[in-house]
Amino acid sequence: MELKASTCLRISSACFFLNSIFVLIFFWIIFPDGFTYFQNQEAVDAARTWGNVNAMLFLSLALIWFFSSNFEDLKPKKVIGMSNFIICILFLCLSTLHMVLDTLDIFYLNPPPPPVWIFLTISGGMGFYAWRKSTA
């Protein structure tokens, strides 16, 4: 069974949309109550601000990939699939860097939670498939 490029881009779009929802839920619902040791309200506000920036980045990429899945020509879909794959690789490399630096106690950088890794991996895989293997 071969997937169409538009289907791959819609799956990638759904993964990034779910990532944006996950980030918003984390920073606006879980974060204030789950981390009671953060007494500094400025630190909480800064974390929420960066959470909003990340969520909007994920959401904007999701919208770009969703709307581009409606292109009729296959070539632009393959280019967008390639960009999706590259962006996911960069995100996964940055996540790995955070995990390594946190594990080595060099910096206190928490790696992203498992759903982020899962969604990025699925989205990157779909981007690669849209780029290299998909049909019209």
Image (cartoon, helix red, strand yellow):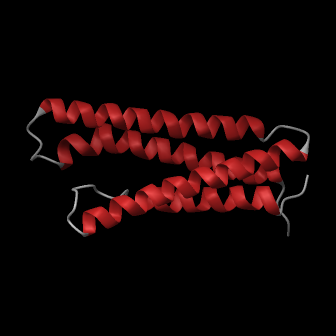
Which residue is outermost to the front?
106
| Residue 45 vertical placement versus 108 (above, below) | above
Residue shown at the point (18%, 35%) measured from the top left: 43
Q: If the image is split into quadrants, where does the N terminus sit?
A: bottom right
**Residue 20, percent across and down?**
48, 41
Instruction: Classify residue 15 as left or right of residue 91.
Output: right
Image quadrant assignment for residue 4: bottom right
The part of the image, by quadrant, that contains residue 119 is bottom right
Q: Nearer the viewer, residue 57 or 67?
A: 57
At horizontal 11% and vertical 46% (from top left) the residue drawn is 36
Judge from the rendering whether residue 46 lies leftward or rightward of residue 89; answer left or right: left
How many numbered marks have been drawn onto this rendered protein structure?
A: 0
Who's the residue at 68% across and 52% down the image? 11
User: 128 and 52: which one is in front?
Assistant: 128
In the image: residue 68, left or right of residue 18:
right
Q: Position of residue 77 (x, y in %)?
A: 81, 45
Q: Residue 46: where, in percent of width, then height? A: 25, 32
Residue 114 on image: x %, y %? 41, 62
